[in-house]
Image (spheres, coloured by chain):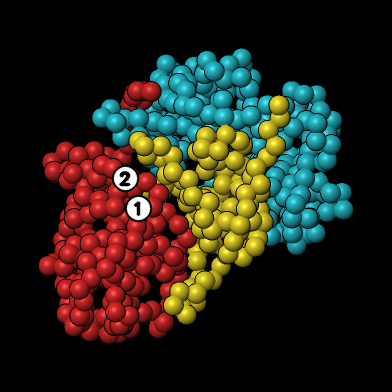
Chain colours: A cyan, B red, C yellow
Amino acid sequence: MTDRREPRRLVWQRAELVDARRETASARTLVFSGPAWTGYMSGQHVDVRLTAEGGYSAERSYSIAAAERPRCFELTVQRLPDGEVSPYFVEEMAIGDEIEVRGPIGGWFAWRPETPDPILLVGGGSGVVPLMAMIRERDRAGSRVPFRLVYSARSVDEALYRDELADRSSTNDRLIVDQIYTRSAPMGYERAPSRISQMDLADLSWAAGSAPRCYVCGPNGFVESVSQLLLALGHAPDMIRTERFGPTGE
Amino acid sequence: MDVATRGFHGRETDPAHKLPPGQYEARGFPVLTAGPTPQIPLDRWQFTIATEQGKSHSWSWPQLLSLPQEEVHVDIHCVTKWSKFDTVWRGVAVDTLLRNVETSAKFVTAHSYGGYSTNLPLADLRDGKAWIVHEYDGQPLAAEHGGPARLLVPHLYFWKSAKWVTRLALATEDHPGFWEMLGYNNYGDPWREQRYTGD
Amino acid sequence: MSISDDNVKVDLDQSKALDGNAAAGAFSVALGVDASMIDIVCAGCGYRAPFAEERAYLEGPGTTLCCRRCASVIGRLATTPAGMWLSLSGSESWRLPIVDG
């Protein structure tokens, strides 16, 4: 309904950090309160703007991870090694500090509970953030749509939302979560660490004949490979939506 | 809205150097991905100066490297507000390339592989103010920084220093280039903070 | 992903580009609709894709949108004190999403 009427929300607005929790050694979830925040579609993102004393400013985009509390939204930020903005969010920003945000933005890479198709989510690294938003939204809406998440992370320590994904999938027979590791896997893990392959996707998702909608998100290289693999498995191009986070990452 | 974000400093800055108005010093050399990166094989690379009379003067890669080379130490200033001090380049002075070019043109459009263009007065490419450079910091210029060769015009905002330069088209009239047509200043002097049209 | 410049075929590498999602905020402000949902037909190669899936470059003086197939420029946006400058040059057409009443 309000999906396409973006502009009235698309001015820069203040948002204040009201809560934060560490997800991994290099990632943190930040909970912002924005007086003008009225909700979002899972998969959407916000643009953020940070201004230093003296006027230098930097803008970035971050996927919304959740919006549990009224007038609040959450971002999960992964600290990038040469990042300009991510180190601030992960290491420095304190409760009470403010940024400017614009959004929510983007109805393309979004999932609505009314969509009847089975959903395949393939995330690499911090690409799991908008996919997690979709999983949370699915549960919030009481949806019974079949969901499968294939989540590729470098190692157990760098995987986001492990406990929550384990909880949600264990209490929900239509949510299946599979974790693959690319650099190091736990001892005895059934799959040796390696990059995602066509076989992984064939094993861990529905056949193309089931016509799932696929959402792929992560670093450019990951999204590029996974898209090609899905096409090779027979998924139709118009059933695959992608969001690329840029060249950094695995 | 005037909101300063507590604790956010951007990249580290060094307060010792003189900056044009509105600029900040960058410590690294940001690779600002402003468009697709052309991959140009050296054996097909060519640089041309085309006069307003339709005459062309062209150089292949070996020909460019056989011309007198200069090492250039300059500060550079990007319109997106970062500046970098003491950058070191190696290349051929545009004066050298213009030596045998007969022209009464006053304007130049620099064209890049990939379609980018930017315009300047020809006078701003003469008298030791501009180079076609192919090395940065002692290394061959990387494609992401405009290699194999880019224009270097450090006295103007860096969008005038066209990456992947392939052609200088001399003309009697001024033709605004890629950003000059879309709100950016036709000249671009950082010391007078000429960022935008009308500044 | 090759174009001809003075008869020299040049490959254009887009592997470092973001996608249209990153540019959607600014273009949505300029156009008054959800830009991510705009269907664009490239004038260079005829390829049609949603804005969100095209390639976006945000680090230049302005934002440049390029065709994901042939890398031609299909749109640009510059935000300046005088206003937002929008160019659709390089596109055959932009189909904007319907705005509900």
Q: Secondary structure at mark 1?
A: helix
Residue shown at 54% from the left, 32% from the top: A46
Of all chains, the one bearing label 1 is: B
For label 1, the residue is B180
Residue toward you, B130 or A119: B130
Q: Which picture quadrant has residue B113? A: bottom left
Give coordinates of residue B68: x percent, y percent: 16, 80
* Relative to C65, residue B4 above or below: above
On-image quarter of the N terminus of chain A: top right
* Relative to A37, residue C6 above or below: below
Please name the amino acid that badge 1 sits on. Glu
Please name the amino acid that badge 2 sits on. Thr
Q: Which mark is residue B197?
A: 2
Give coordinates of residue B20: x percent, y percent: 18, 43
Residue toward you, A181 or B186: B186
Q: Which mark is residue B8?
A: none
